[in-house]
Image (tube, helix red, strand yellow):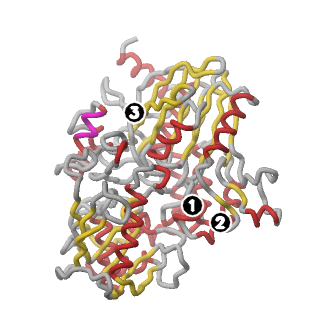
Amino acid sequence: MRRRDVVKILASAVLSGILPPVGVAGDDDLYDIGRFGNARVLHMTDTHAQLLPLYFREPSVNIGIGTMQGRPPHLVGRAFLKHFGLAPGGRAAYAFTYLDYQEAAHRYGSMGGFAHLQTLIGRLRAEAGAGNSILLDGGDLWQGSGLANATQGADMVEIANRLGIEAMTAHWEFTYGEQILRRNIGQFKGEFLAQNVFLSDDAAFNNAPAYDPQSGRVFKPATIRQLGGSRVAIIGQAMPYVPIAHPKRFVPDWTFGIHEAALQKVVDGVRDRDKADAVLLLSHNGMDVDLKLASRVTGIDVILGGHTHDAVPQPSIVANSRGKTLVTNAGSNGKFLAVLDLDIGKGAVKDARYHLLPIFTTLIAPDRDMAALIDRLRAPYTRRFDEKLATADELLFRRGNFSGPMDQVICDALRQELDVPIAFSPGFRFGATALAGQPITMETLLSETAITYPEVYVQEMSGGQIKAVMEDIADNLFNPDPYYQQGGDMVRVGGMDYACAPGASTGQRISDMRLDDGSALQADKSYRVAGWASVNPQHGKPVSEVVAKYLREQKTVRIKRPNRITLKGADHNPGVGERG
């Protein structure tokens, strides 16, 4: 059958009401991926509650260290396009890279949005046929927007139920605390899976609630689903470092970790006891961690990964002692939907096809019912969210290992409003991009700052303490052992330039620290430093209020002096992009 004939058949199905409408462009329907195998797995992750279409620029710096240098996901720009065989200047280059982003954004439009996702998911599931597909979410679904923060994730539970998510794992969801998390799980129609969360010894002694009191496992570790006549196991792997990356007070009774041995037992159990024909790990480890894990834990066919927000169009194949594992990562902020088609035989996956589909709003019609639900949920907050705070004078984005213009704006606001020479802002990888000339609304700002511990603070720190903090964060980002990486990017710094050698040893990466006036940071001198998102309790205003006040006063946002980070030893690293 010719490609154009497939497009005609799909168009006929739209008219007959079988499939939701998805726009096509002549013979080049981006979403006509064909049908393969007997089971279709749809995977989304790290949407951070971004219900509406948005702009989100991919990184120009994503450095790989040691064995990870030059390997996905640590490729950017033209190196990324060359590795994956993608043409420059087209839709794929816009979706997957930062190249010519402002111009491409005007050409190809916004991306994502749950109403558009609903349409595409409906089409792909209908193509697979009844009982042959499943929709999975890899976490960071219920947090990340002003609306999610206001409802403590309840809005996203309703959205997830409408979308038809059948199983999920988690990360930022834990920052709502146990009571709210359990409330949301109780309202969620799918299954919440996490094999790597256990009761602390004290909590177990006090008979705290657990899915399996004997092992201390807090949540259901895995589920078995019938897909296309085969038994498919889905195992959940939550973010392993929750009590380290976030305030421990949110989850005082629970311990986290990678838990290789426990995971191997779960894999062996679904293989031997439950007779699974295919085993999938729904992971929020981050891609580097998943690649290492795949080489050490055997019996997993595919890892559906998230956490590090890497949009990787082809799986990596990892060999281990019992065969091989495919490792994927499906991007973030609602920009992509992954489609894993499996040909499953008795007790084994015979073959697989994988597509990471960009969600172009100009090519996919929004689902009316989902759009209406989103409007209803947003209605009580619309006036606040739609407030225009300022206009962007340049492209404002966050994603990247070291900094971005949106991070600089946040740091500049902290410095001015709190009257300090230095400001820190966390290296979060979520938040909408604002195009030059585009209004910055309160909703845009909240996509950057709406967390459950947003309070600002000012504290005295010596130059030596500042360096130690930065070295610790750099080690988290650039440690050559992925199991010592917690995800996220380098802390953003306002009011100070510095140099970083990613490949240097622990404690030796940060140097040449100089304030805006050119003076060197002195180890024994005290400095006033502002920040937010501290793991320790703070009592300042929410950072959104501080930055909103600054933006209203600015009216047009111009970054007067971008703070500079000089890279050392990364001249030929394909994780460092070129201009354009």
Residue 461 visible (yes or no): yes
For residue 251, which numbered disc appears in the image? 2
**Cβ atoms at labels 1 and 2 below 8 Å apart:** yes
Please tell me which of labels 1 and 2 falls first in the chain: 1
Please tell me which of labels 2 and 3 falls first in the chain: 2
Question: Mark 2 belongs to which amino acid?
Answer: Val
In the displayed structure, would residue 204 be above or below residue 93?
below
**Cβ atoms at labels 2 and 3 below 8 Å apart:** no
Query: Which of the two residues, 389 or 297, is positioned nearer the viewer here?
Result: 297
For marks 1 and 3, give the one nearer the viewer: 1
Name the residue located 49 percent from the left edge and 34 percent from the top edge.
20
Residue on which disc 3 sits: 314
Instruction: Write down the region rendered in magenta.
Output: 79-83
Residue 431 visible (yes or no): no
Residue 128 placed where, x, y %?
A: 55, 25
For residue 141, which numbered disc appears in the image? none
Residue 388 placed where, x, y %?
A: 34, 71
Magenta: main secondary structure: helix
Name the residue located 18 percent from the left edge and 49 percent from the top edge.
578
Q: Distance between the residues labelled 1 and 3?
A: 28 Å
Q: From the viewer's perspective, tell me whether residue 503 is left or right of residue 560.
A: right
Q: From the viewer's perspective, tell me whether residue 491 is left or right of residue 371.
A: left
Tell me, yes or no, whether the highlighted magenta stretch contains residue 25: no
Report crowding for label 2: few under 14, some 14 to 19, many 20 or more residues within 10 A (C-alpha). Answer: some
Report crowding for label 1: few under 14, some 14 to 19, many 20 or more residues within 10 A (C-alpha). Answer: many
Residue on which disc 1 sits: 242
Tell me, yes or no, whether the highlighted magenta stretch contains residue 81: yes
Quadrant for the N terminus in the image = top left
Please tell me which of labels 1 and 3 falls first in the chain: 1
Query: Which of the two residues, 558 or 76, is positioned nearer the viewer here?
Result: 76
Question: Mark 3 belongs to which amino acid?
Answer: Gln
